[in-house]
Amino acid sequence: MTRYRKPERPGSKYATAEGARRLREELDYLWRVQRPQVTRAVAEAAAQGDRSENAEYTYGKKQLREIDRRVRFLRKRLDGLVVVSRPPDDPRRIYFGAWVRIEDDEGHETVFRIVGPDEIDPARRYVSMDAPLSRALMGRGLDDEVTVEVPGGRKTYVVTEIRYGEE
């Protein structure tokens, strides 16, 4: 057994203005608030003496590594991020940032927004532009039919509404 892991395919470099703001806020919070708190806790634990059996010290160091890993990821991600803050030239077609309403063969309607991979949020109905359904819908227009491979087989959808902006 090897420790090699196949590198993950990086997600798309696009984000909405709101998504980019949330990533910057997370980076700021981690760097200015959480990391100094954990650093102080580690210093206090280290001052207690023997570090080999000091659970607070060991856990604090682990937390620092996790925070630093996330900070590195966010900085790298924000450096290459392309913020899309305006609707496309042709709002009758589905592109990044669109709110889309689709209907399946059985008449069930679904509404979701196509966003960047860092903004996925099922509760807000945000779907990544890298998802198979989103990729199939890109560039399509009203009343276009799309067939997507899903775990249960193939499913066909019809685009019933396209709009841009906040919900």
Image (cartoon, rainbow, N blue to C red):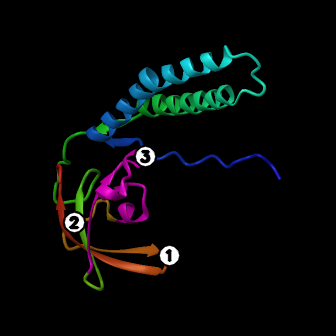
Residue type (three-letter) at the residue carrying disc 2: Gly
Give the mark, 2 or 1, whose residue is nearer the N terminus: 2
Image position of 61 with respect to 110: above or below: above
**Extent of the magenta region:** 108-136
Front tag of 2 and 1: 1
Direction from residue 110 to residue 120 in the image, left or right: right
Q: Residue furthest bottom?
A: 106
Residue type (three-letter) at the residue carrying disc 3: Ser
Direction from residue 58 to residue 72 in the image, left or right: left
Image position of 39 with respect to 120: above or below: above
Residue under pointer 2: 141
Marks 2 and 1 sit apart, C-alpha to C-alpha, by 25 Å
Instruction: Please tell me whether residue 118 belongs to the stretch shown in magenta.
Output: yes
Depth order, front residue of 28/77 = 28
Depth order, front residue of 138/23 = 23
Residue type (three-letter) at the residue carrying disc 1: Pro
Front tag of 1 and 3: 1
Instruction: Where is residue 5? Give x, y as percent.
Output: 70, 48
Instruction: Where is residue 77? Give x, y as percent.
Output: 45, 34
Secondary structure under the numbered disc 1 in the rendered image = loop
Give the mark, 2 or 3, whose residue is nearer the N terminus: 3
Marks 2 and 3 sit apart, C-alpha to C-alpha, by 22 Å
Image position of 81 with respect to 125: above or below: above
For the point 35% across and 31% down, the residue is 25
Marks 1 and 3 sit apart, C-alpha to C-alpha, by 23 Å
Secondary structure under the numbered disc 2 in the rendered image = loop
Residue under pointer 3: 12
Residue under pointer 1: 151
Instruction: Where is residue 144? Give x, y as percent.
Output: 24, 73
